[in-house]
Image (tube, rainbow, N blue to C red):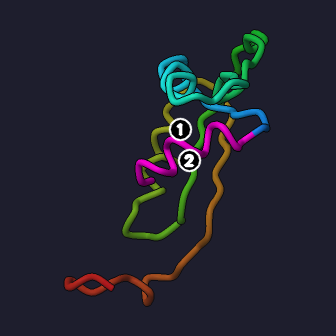
Amino acid sequence: MNSLQLAVAPALYRGKVVTFSRSSMLELRALGYRDVCVVKLGINLPAPKRVPRENLVVIPGSLKPWKHPDMGIKAFAALPGEFRLALFGIYEPPSTRPTSGGW
């Protein structure tokens, strides 16, 4: 913005100016904008409700043999019986394994 625009724009602009910080509001008012308000960014969420603890083992991700999901299954098998297992992902056979040079 050139100096003419800085001098004329606030006088011609009649609408509300919205900004996100008090400091920018003060700067805009110093430039001559009259109706400036601050709007906080983001949202306020209520505190999360307490969720009962669950004995759940989750193994997410691609079920590629070279990623060794079998190790997670073996670790799960060693846990007491009150644990549950959630295993999910996409299976890719060994023939899709990347070469040593990557993809």
Q: For mark 2, does the 10 Å Cα neighbourhood hold few (<14), some (14 to 19), or many (20 or more) residues?
A: some
Q: Are marks 1 and 2 in contact (CB under 8 Å)?
A: yes
Q: Is residue 82 visible?
A: no
The amino acid pointed to by label 2 is Ile
Task: Reply yes or no: does residue 11 show up in magenta.
Answer: yes
Classify 55 as above or below 12: above
Q: CA distance from mark 1 to mark 2?
A: 10 Å
Sequence-first tag of 1 and 2: 2
- Indicate which disc residue 59 carries: 2
Please state the extent of the stretch shown in magenta in the rendering: 1-13
Q: Is residue 101 left or right of residue 62?
A: left
Asked whether 48 or 92 is in front, the reply is 48
Task: Reply yes or no: does residue 30 show up in magenta.
Answer: no
The amino acid pointed to by label 1 is Phe
- Quarter occupied by the C terminus: bottom left
Q: Is residue 36 visible?
A: yes
Label 1 element class = helix
Asked whether 52 or 86 is in front, the reply is 52
Classify 75 as above or below 44: below
Reading the image, the residue beneath label 1 is: 76
